[in-house]
Amino acid sequence: MEKTVTEAIKYRRSTRVYKKIDIDTEQVKQCLYNASLAPTSSNLQLWEFYHVTNKKTLKQIAEACFNQSAAKTANQIVVVVTRKDLWKQRAKANIQFLNSVYNKPDLSDKDLKRKKMATNYYKKLIPTIYTDFLGILGFTKYIIFQIVGIFKPIYRQTRLSDMRIVAHKSAGLAAQNFMISMAAVGYDTCPMEGSDTLRVKKILNLPSGSEINMVIGCGIREESGIYGPRFRIPFEEVYKEV
């Protein structure tokens, strides 16, 4: 029986040692599908999920993760990848989707307006934000937007570094969807920062425009793989009602 959302969140712990027990590849794939339903900036979905089950590749990834236990003992590994370089294709896919949704002869004025606004968003605003050349255009837009922002609220994240952060935030949301989904079915995970990301990219044959968001070890926990009780800063210190 699957856990509730709250139960899954409480159950999830970063597991650094896994039992030598196989986990269901199809069930992990379903959890990755849940990851793909995560919220994402402008619905661009600038992510990819590499589900590693091949023993040889698992060993290579573990070595690229410095052979830390969370990678070395993992039954499977998931690599979350950002694909900011695919923004044009993903914007085009959104436009195609809008055309299919609003492909009716008797659209109301409200629907026509909504279609026009959304289409202009992907045809005009997204290119304005994402188009760059060696960081120069992004910095120029940043300066212009800061000046305009003196007089009215405006979107300010226009630099190349800003758009990288946006892509990684969306990928992080997807990764959390995945880990909670895994916890719900009794599987364990460990998101790892420690890895040679260039080597991971080479192992997976990723294009230069891609970036590793995180590597996630997957399996069934050994109790020794949970390194002590959970510690969190007191909630009152981080909760601010405004």
Image (cartoon, rainbow, N blue to C red):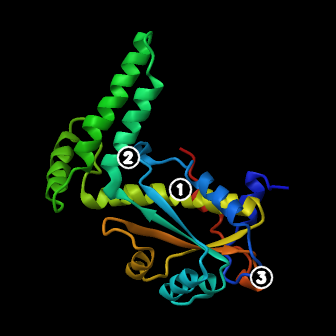
34 with respect to 142 (left or right): right
Closer to the camera: disc 1 or disc 2? 2
Number of the label disc, if any, that sits on residue 147: none
Residue 232 quadrant:
bottom right
Q: Mark 1 and mark 2 in contact? Answer it, CB < 8 Å.
A: no
Q: How many marks?
A: 3
Question: Which kind of residue does numbered mark 2 sit on?
Answer: Arg
The N terminus, quarter of image: bottom right
**71, 3: nearer the viewer:** 71
Q: Which residue is mark 2?
A: 90
The residue singled out by tag 3 in the image is 222
Residue hosting label 1: 173
Q: Name the residue nearer the viewer: 33 or 9.
A: 33
Separation of marks 1 and 2 at Cα, in angstroms: 18 Å
Give the residue type that dot 3 points to. Glu
Q: Are marks 3 and 1 in contact (CB under 8 Å)?
A: no
Considering only vertical position in the picture, is 9 above or below 144? below
Residue 238, relative to residue 226: is it above or below?
A: above
